[in-house]
Image: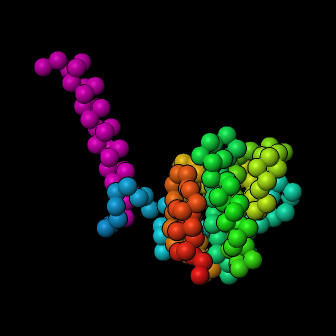
Amino acid sequence: MNTKRVLPVLLLATLIVGGFWIWWSRVPAGAAASQPESIPLKGHPAPDFTLQTPEGEIIALSDLRGKAVVLNFWATWCPPCRAEMPELQAAWEAYEPGGLVVLGVNQAEDAAAVQAYRQELGLTFPVVLDAQYEAADLYSVNSLPTTFFIDRDGVIRDVVVGQMNAALLGERIKTIYP
């Protein structure tokens, strides 16, 4: 037996088995293997965060308790984000008087770039800057856009990963807005 060949194979096998064991041990008993414990799940409280708007105002998610919230993670460089922005703006205009908040969470871009983007698209719903990915980490956001639908009690009722059209957005808003 050639130990020069066997040793690397054993080392690789140990790393694979060890990595699988670490991954598997993070999955809660009875949970789907594709949903690590840290991902906020439907039916669970929305993690709170406090971030600043481009204008310098401080917004905490907990300050919005009592209102239904469409929490949208996005960036200016993201084409699907840009495509769904008019739908989010229309939802904000239609439902804001009745207590719905569309809150955009911009990912790691400076205030000037975000303001220029908002002006270009005519966006008036509130936006906060997640410069250090604090909120994105809390919500385990790995893809943009990602949108969480949070009811008036602060409970996540639905999550959409990817671009939404008007019909999908309207359908999901019904889960949080009477």
- Answer above or below: position of 38 versus 68: above
- Answer above or below: position of 15 versus 115: above
Query: Which residue is located at x 29 percent, y 31 percent?
Result: 11
**What range is drawn magenta here?**
1-28
> Which of the image's four quarters has the C terminus?
bottom right
Residue 150 visible in the snapshot = yes
Give how far across and how far down residue 99 sits, in percent.
Answer: 70, 78
> Which of the image's four quarters has the N terminus?
top left
Total residue callouts? 0
- Its colouring scheme is rainbow
Query: Which residue is located at x 35 percent, y 44 percent?
Result: 19
In this view of the protein, which residue sits in the foreground, 20 or 34? 34
Q: Main secondary structure of the magenta part?
A: helix
Query: Which residue is located at x 63 percent, y 42 percent?
Result: 78
Give how far across and how far down residue 128 sits, in percent.
Answer: 75, 58
- Answer above or below: position of 24 versus 109: below
Give how far across and how far down residue 172 sits, in percent.
Answer: 53, 68
Residue 80 is covered by the magenta coloring = no
Give how far across and how far down residue 69 sits, in percent.
Answer: 65, 70
Residue 135 visible in the snapshot = no
Q: Which residue in the rendered view is the most extreme toward the right? A: 55
Q: Which residue in the rendered view is the most extreme toward the left? A: 1
In this view of the protein, which residue sits in the foreground, 71 or 133? 71
Query: Which residue is located at x 55 percent, y 56 percent?
Result: 164
For this view, does 147 lie left or right of residue 66?
Answer: left
